[in-house]
Image (cartoon, rainbow, N blue to C red):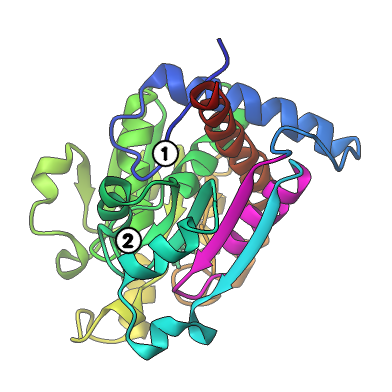
Amino acid sequence: MPLALPHLTTAHGLTRTTILELFQSAEEYYTRLRIGTKRFDVLQGISVVLAFFENSTRTRMSFEIAAKRLSAEITGFQASASSVNKGETLLDTIRNIEAMHVDVLVMRHSSSGAHEFLRRHAGCRIVNAGDGQHEHPTQALLDAFTLTRKFGHLEGLKYCLVGDILHSRVARSNIPIFKALGAEVAVCAPGTLLPKDIASFGVKTFSDIDTAVAWADAMNVLRIQFERQDQGLIPTIREYTEWFGVKDHHLRLKPNIAILHPGPINRGIELEAIVADAAQSLILPQVEHGVAIRMAVLTALANDIRATRH
Ligand code: ASP
């Protein structure tokens, strides 16, 4: 039986088996895309709306390309040019979209929990492309896929997320996925950028970058989310970079370390420019893998749609 998913709103609860099935499907797409295949008919007859209520470059394009490669019927929804600006509620907006017989809604929204809310109240399939500081499941899947392709598997891999954990939806989705795949997960951040309930995440914590690098096989370097902060949680950028930035000398110390970053990168803040471009950096492979992962996710949704249509 091919993998069928009704929705993808959260990374929590995705089992190791489901994740590995998604990786297997992504690997097949990745290989076919690499040899130049541009069209698959998997989503023929399925309509996908891309609704981005928050800024996005990579994720939006990646979903759009993934859906196009799979032959979906795609509609883009530009929140800044919509009736949301006239005071329409999210649920009303989505119910209107549904009334046009949309099958799948890929949405990014600044409100944490918006997708869970819609999953309960809306009729179409929901894919979370980032909700506030809550979750970003496809980013976590593509991060884990990237490191699985590099290391073969994640069992026992020492994996450290560094930076603004407090506001990071990437971290909140990464932690359950990497743990489900058997990695040892750590976070490295100043105390002010850690969630208060970090103890309940079941991860190791580091408060300086040198110790974290010495421990880790792979680091996922996160951006400081200035747009989600209304108070000065770090004294100055310069001090943050000094204490938590990933630098050239770390790569010399740990030549086999893998560096991930979900983008957009702030060169010279959370990592030195030379680190972003180094051989250890998997930042562009992450972007390439993102399309294959999103194709795998959309395929699993299409399988569920077809199974329930018959
Ligand atoms: N692109 C990622 C996100 O949407 C990371 C970031 O913005 O820093 O969460």
The amino acid at mark 2 is Ser
Q: Does label 1 point to a residue whose CB lies under 8 Å from ligand 1?
A: no
The residue that appears at 18% across and 61% down in the rendered structure is: 194
The residue that appears at 49% across and 62% down in the rendered structure is: 97
Instruction: Name above or below for residue 4 compared with residue 197.
Output: above
Depth check, front residue: 304 or 112: 304
- Residue farthest toward the bottom in the current orientation of the protein: 86
Residue 149: horizontal and vertical position, in percent? 62, 30
**Quadrant of res 216:** top left
Please state, as top left, top right, bottom left or bottom right, where the N terminus lies in the image.
Answer: top right
The residue that appears at 41% across and 59% down in the rendered structure is: 130
State yes or no: residue 220 in magenta. no
Q: Which mark is residue 7?
A: 1
Element under disc 1: loop
Task: Tell me the quadrant of ligand 1.
Answer: bottom left
**Quadrant of res 270:** bottom left
Q: CA distance from mark 1 to mark 2?
A: 22 Å
Q: Does label 2 point to a residue whose CB lies under 8 Å from ligand 1?
A: yes
Q: Nearer the viewer, mark 1 or mark 2?
A: 1
State the count of labels: 2
- Residue farthest toward the top in the current orientation of the protein: 1
